[in-house]
Each structure stands twice: as structure tokens, then as C-alpha cells.
Amino acid sequence: MSSSDPKFAEAVDRFNASDAARNFLDRLKVKPVTVEKGSAVFEVTVDETHLRTMGIAHGGLLATVLDSCLGCACWTLAPPESHVVTVQLNINYIRPAWLGETLTAHAEVRHAGQMTAVSRGEVRTAEGALVAAASGTFMYLPIPPGAKPVMEKRDEMERWKTG
């Protein structure tokens, strides 16, 4: 997770410091494995909390893993002081993921412009079976001056209501 490019180092630091993003991924037990300039790898092991009927992983889990992995890869190329938000996400589900399977998502940026980036990726089992493939478009969104994390804003509003 290191590079001589200061923009890359900043992107990795921002991702690692993003409590809101990590909190959601932590709840789903999704872990970033590697983050490199223009690419990312995430992993999750399917457990009971991820299942829908018939004992298979919910498609929303796969969508979240792919969206996060593709977006993180784009984030490594984002301008300084910018968020990356999903504009479009296309997923093709190939086969079910079963309880106990470890899934690995790989993402690679295909294009990074001034305002948007396009990445593609896939999720595979530990044995290499393709579970899903995706492409996504992400927009670079400048962080407004004085912006606060969502939880800090919520806490501030709660104090205002009770104060």
C-alpha cells in the first residue's frame, strides 16, 4: 500500500481514515486486502448474515463488495480533497455464492479523467470460480470546505434539538 506518488498515498490514507465507509463494510465483514494505484482487492467470507433464501449470498452483498472495490480503485486516482461517488454500476451475476465461501473482488481502473473514472472488476471464489462481474462509473466530488463526517453532523443536530 505504498507508492512514491503523494496523491496515491493521500487516497489510501483517506480510505483508511473513512470511518463511515469502513463502518458499513465492517458490518458486512468486507475487508480491503490491497489498495494500489489504479486497483484494489477486497474480500469477504459468506456467513449466515449474508444469506437470502436457498442458502445463497444476497446479491446486495456482491453489489456492495463490487461497488466498494471499484470505487476504491478509482479513489486512488482522485484529485486531492475529493470524494468518489458512484454514478453507474452494472453487475452481471454468474453463479451463486454459498455459505462458507471466501470471495475476492478485484478491481482495475480503465479510465481516469478530470471529473470521472471508469473501473471494472469481478468476484471469484477461492477456487477461482467467477461469481459476478461489474463495471462502474465514478465521479470525483470536491469535499466542501468545513465539511464534517456524517456522524459528527448527526451528533451536532442532536445537541441542537435537545439544547
Image (tube, grey):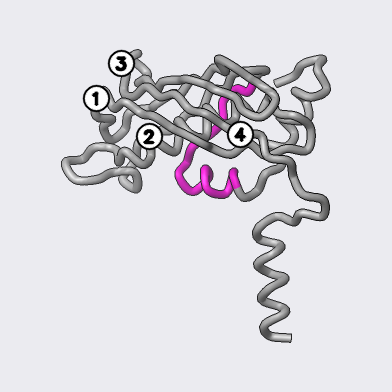
Residue located beneath label 3 in the image: 129
Alpha-carbon span between mark 1 and mark 4: 30 Å
Which of the marked residues, 1 or 4, is nearer the chain's N terminus?
1
| Rendering coords of residue 130 (x, y %) | 32, 17
Residue located beneath label 1 in the image: 95
Between circles 3 and 4, the one closer to the viewer is: 4
Which of the marked residues, 3 or 1, is nearer the chain's N terminus?
1
Count of labels shown? 4
Q: Secondary structure at mark 4?
A: strand
Alpha-carbon span between mark 3 and mark 2: 14 Å
- The residue carrying pointer 2 sits among few (fewer than 14), some (14 to 19) or many (20 or more) residues within 10 Å by Cα, namely many
> As shown in the figure, which amino acid type bears the numbered disc 4?
Met
Magenta residues, as a range? Answer: 21-35
| Rendering coords of residue 96 (x, y %) | 24, 29
> As shown in the figure, which amino acid type bears the numbered disc 1?
Arg
Q: Secondary structure at mark 3?
A: loop
Which of the marked residues, 4 or 2, is nearer the chain's N terminus?
2
Tell which of 119 and 39 is nearer to you.
119
Alpha-carbon span between mark 3 and mark 4: 31 Å
Between circles 1 and 4, the one closer to the viewer is: 4
Residue located beneath label 2 in the image: 62
Between circles 3 and 2, the one closer to the viewer is: 2
- The residue carrying pointer 3 sits among few (fewer than 14), some (14 to 19) or many (20 or more) residues within 10 Å by Cα, namely few
Residue located beneath label 4 in the image: 139
